Every structure is written in C-alpha cells, then in structure tokens.
Image: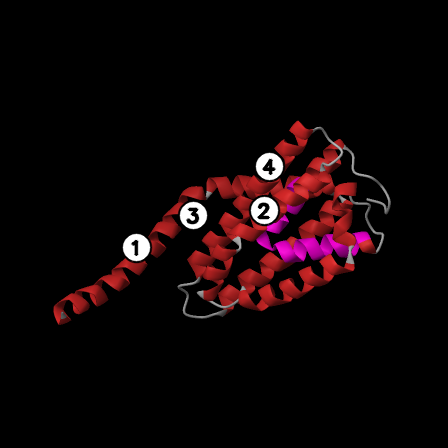
C-alpha cells in the first residue's frame, strides 16, 4: 500500500485481523511497529490509531518490547510471563480494533472490537500452548528459537497488514484454521502439564504427611 492511502472496507478488515493476531503474539512489537510506520509516513492509519505515532507510545512500546524479548525466552518463567500478558495482549488488541473502526457505526465498531479480542485470544492461546509443549525440553534453544520466531512473525504481520492488508488477513485466517484443527492437541498438552505438576507435588505431600 502506498504511503497516504487510506484503508477501505476489505483492507480495514485485513488490517484488524492481521494486527490483532500479531498483538496476540507480541503486543509491544505490534504497537511499536505500527507507530514507527505511521510516524515515518509509510502508512496512513485510521484516525483512531493516530496516537500510536506518538514518540511516547513508540518509546514505551519499544522499552517493553526489549524487556519481553529477554523475559519471553527464559524457560518456565515465560509461562508466567505469558499468563500475565493474557490481561494485556487481548485488551490492547481489542482497543486497536476499536480505534481502527472509529469512523464506523457503533454496532460495527463493537463487532470489530470483539473480533479483534477474539483473534488475539486465539493467537495468545496458541502461543501459550506451544510454550507448554517445549518447556519440558531439557535444552533452552527450542524455547529461544520459538520466541524469536513469534517476535519476527508479529513484526512481519504488522508490516504486511499496513502494505498488503488483504494478503495479511488471508495468512492469519490460515493460521486460525490450523489453530482450530490442533485445538484438541492444545487442550491435551495443557492437561498433561497440569497432571505432571500434580504428580510431582504428590510425593512431597505424602512425605509431609508422614513426617507429621
């Protein structure tokens, strides 16, 4: 998309879908990328998203992205980090969708907000499940590679959404279909994690009871 070109109906949908998914992976990278692109004049964001071009927003997002870049790559700690960010990524994605549709009717704006939050939830859930799967691995490399890949994908999708929003939205739809297909595996992985934790805690509980 050329600089200064405005988002039409289908392009706006693609933008919301792609950016919401990216925010579910790494919300700080998504906000910082949108802000930098808008500030540089490489994209004309909808009026409701103009605050993202502020250096205050860009700077804060950049600092938080730097923190997450390291925190998200520490095995086990990344699970707590991602659990905490359930209350960050999804609401921010919903707010981005809300701001992007400020020119639409309240009904359509509400629908876009709910869709943005739901898409971010799907991306966040898939990311968390992937971490649950690789965390038991004895080597930290898989965790680092997975996290770096998520960061790269978030930035790439955000950039693509501002240049070719329909294509970006199509890619995310494919990702969402894959997530739906593997949802059973995701749920099973989560159950195995908690079951393993309970089994590890059981012997210590029995020892405590015997000692008492």
Mark 4 → mark 3, Cα distance in angstroms: 21 Å
Q: Mark 2 or mark 3: which is in front?
A: 2
Question: Residue tagged by mark 4?
Answer: 115
Q: Are marks 2 and 3 in contact (CB under 8 Å)?
A: no
Asked whether, in this view, residue 84 is left or right of residue 136, the answer is right
Task: Give the mark nearer the N terminus: 1 vs 2.
Answer: 2
The magenta region covers 16-38
Helix, strand or loop status at disc 1:
helix
72, above or below 129, in the image: below
Question: Residue tagged by mark 2?
Answer: 91
Task: Give the mark nearer the N terminus: 2 vs 3.
Answer: 2
Position of residue 52 measured from the top left corner of the image (x, y, whole percent): 74, 52
Mark 1 → mark 4, Cα distance in angstroms: 33 Å
Mark 1 → mark 2, Cα distance in angstroms: 30 Å
Can residue 154 be seen by looking at this rendering? yes
Asked whether, in this view, residue 68 is left or right of residue 206, the answer is right
- Count of labels in the image: 4
- State the residue in front, 28 or 176: 28
Q: Is residue 26 part of the magenta span, yes or no?
A: yes
Q: Residue 23 carries which label?
A: none
Q: Main secondary structure of the magenta part?
A: helix
């Amino acid at each position: 998309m050329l600089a200064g070109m405005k988002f039409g109906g289908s392009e706006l949908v693609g933008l919301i879908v792609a950016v919401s998914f990216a925010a579910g992976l790494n919300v700080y990278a998504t906000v910082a990328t949108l802000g930098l692109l808008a500030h540089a004049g490489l994209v004309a964001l909808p009026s409701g998203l103009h605050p993202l071009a502020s250096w205050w927003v860009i700077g804060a997002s950049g600092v938080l992205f730097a923190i997450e870049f390291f925190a998200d790559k520490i095995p086990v700690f990344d699970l707590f980090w991602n659990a905490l960010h359930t209350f960050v990524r999804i609401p921010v994605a919903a707010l981005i969708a809300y701001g992007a549709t400020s020119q639409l009717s309240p009904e359509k704006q509400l629908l876009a907000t709910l869709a943005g939050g739901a898409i971010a939830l799907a991306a966040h859930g898939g990311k968390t499940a992937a971490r649950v799967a690789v965390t038991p691995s004895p080597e930290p490399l898989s965790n680092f590679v997975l996290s770096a890949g998520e960061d790269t994908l978030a930035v790439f999708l955000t950039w693509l959404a501002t240049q070719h929003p329909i294509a970006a939205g199509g890619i995310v739809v494919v990702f969402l279909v894959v997530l739906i297909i593997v949802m059973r595996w995701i749920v099973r992985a989560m159950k195995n994690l908690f079951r393993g934790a309970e089994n590890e805690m059981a012997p210590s509980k029995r020892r405590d009871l015997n000692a008492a």
